[in-house]
Image (tube, rainbow, N blue to C red):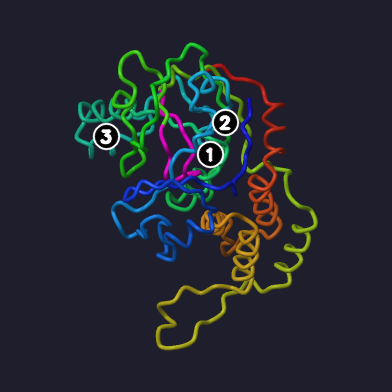
Amino acid sequence: MERLIDFSRDRQMLCGGCGRRFVVGLDWIDRWEQGGEKCPGCGLTCEHEDAPRVTVDPDDPVLDDDRVVSVSWYHTSTQPDWPTRDFDPAAVLTPETRMMMGGDEHVAAWAARQRAKALHIGTYEAAVHNMLRRTRDQADPGSRFYLYRVRLDPSVVVRECWLIDPSDFAGDVVLEEVCPPGVDVARYLNYHEDPGGLCLALGREAIAGVQQVPVPLPDAWDADWVREAVAALETASDGPVPAAGRLARFMRQASPRAVLGRELAAALAGRLPVNLRDQFTSTAAFAEGDDPARWARRTSALLDLIANPARVLSALGKAGHRQV
C-alpha cells in the first residue's frame, strides 16, 4: 500500500517546555530554526533545550503495527544490490588499509561492528532526503543512486510504540540496541530526513524483497526547460574569468557558464519546499567542464523525482521483485 507522498505537508510540533502540540508549515520551521518564531504556548525559541521539536503525526498509518508490514517503505543507496545478503565490509579493504587498521584481527572486529548496524528504511520523502544529504555531505555527487521499494517479511515482529531517533552522530544504529531478541523491526521518529516521519531500523532478515530503479530516472526531464537551459549555457563562456583585487590569486576562478549553471539550479530549487532547497542546489551544482546537455537533463530529472513521484512509482511498478 502506498502512502500519500507530500514533501510540503504540515508538521506536528511538541514543546518540551509547556507540552503544547501544534501544527506548522515548513516555512514556519525554517523561520523558527533561525530564531524568528516562538512556541505559541510558552514563547520558547529554538535556542532553549526544551524548545519545540517535530513529533509524530497521530494519524500516521504506521502507528498501527499491522500497517507496518502492509505499506511500502523506501531506501536510496549507491549499492546496486542493496541489501547485500552476504555483506562483507572488509572485502573492499586493500592490504595497506588492513595494515593501517592493525591487522586481520582488528579488521575482523571492525567488520563485525559494521554488520551489527541496523538498516534504515522510511518514507519516499525520507529516501529522497537521504540521497540529497549524502550528495551534499558525503562527497557523492558523481555516484549513481538507486531507489528501492522495500517489502517486509509478513512474519516480522514490530517493537511496540516508537523511539526518538536513536542514530549516533554518524547516523548509525546498533541493531540489537533497538531490536532486542524476538523483535525484528523498530519504528523511530526521524528528525533529519522527512522530519516528523516514522522510519524503521531493522536487520536484513526482516526484508522479503525489493524493487529497484536508478534515480533520477534517465528520461524524466522537462524537454522545454532542458532546451532553454542548454541554449543559455552554450552561449555563455566556459573560460575562467580573472578575479580582481589583492586576494585574486587565492580565489577559485569560475566561468560565466558555471555561474549561470548554479543560478539555473538555484531557480529550480526555488520551486521546492524550503527544507529541500539547499540540498537540491548543492546536488545539482554545475561544475567546470560539465556538459550542458547532460547536466540539464540530470538536473531536470532530479527535480522530477520530487515534483512528480508518480512517474517514479510507475517505473517501480514495472521493475521486477528481487528476493533478499
The residue where tag 3 is placed is: 98
Q: Earlier in the sequence, mark 3 or mark 2?
A: 3
Image position of 220 (left or right of 244): right
What residue is drawn where x is 60% and y is 62%?
289
Q: Which segment is the magenta one? A: 188-202
| Left or right position of 309 against 195 | right
Q: Are marks 3 and 2 in contact (CB under 8 Å)?
A: no
Q: Which residue is mark 2?
A: 148
Callout 2: few (<14), some (14-19), or many (20+) C-alpha neighbours within 10 Å? many
The mark nearer the N terminus, 1 or 3, is: 3
Q: Which sits in the foreground, 210 or 45?
A: 45
Closer to the camera: disc 2 or disc 1? 1
Rendered location of residue 95, percent (x, y): 29, 34
Q: On the image, which quarter does residue 226 sit in?
A: bottom right
Q: Which amino acid, by three-letter code, is at mark 3?
A: Arg
Q: Amino acid at mark 1?
A: Ala
Quarter location, residue 314: top right
Which element is circle 2 on?
A: strand
In whole angstroms, how far apart are the C-alphas of marks 3 and 2?
A: 32 Å
Give the number of the disc on residue 192: none
Q: Is residue 50 left or right of residue 128?
A: left
How far across and how far down the image is residue 213, in percent? 63, 33
The reply to whether dot 2 and dot 1 touch (C-beta < 8 Å) is yes
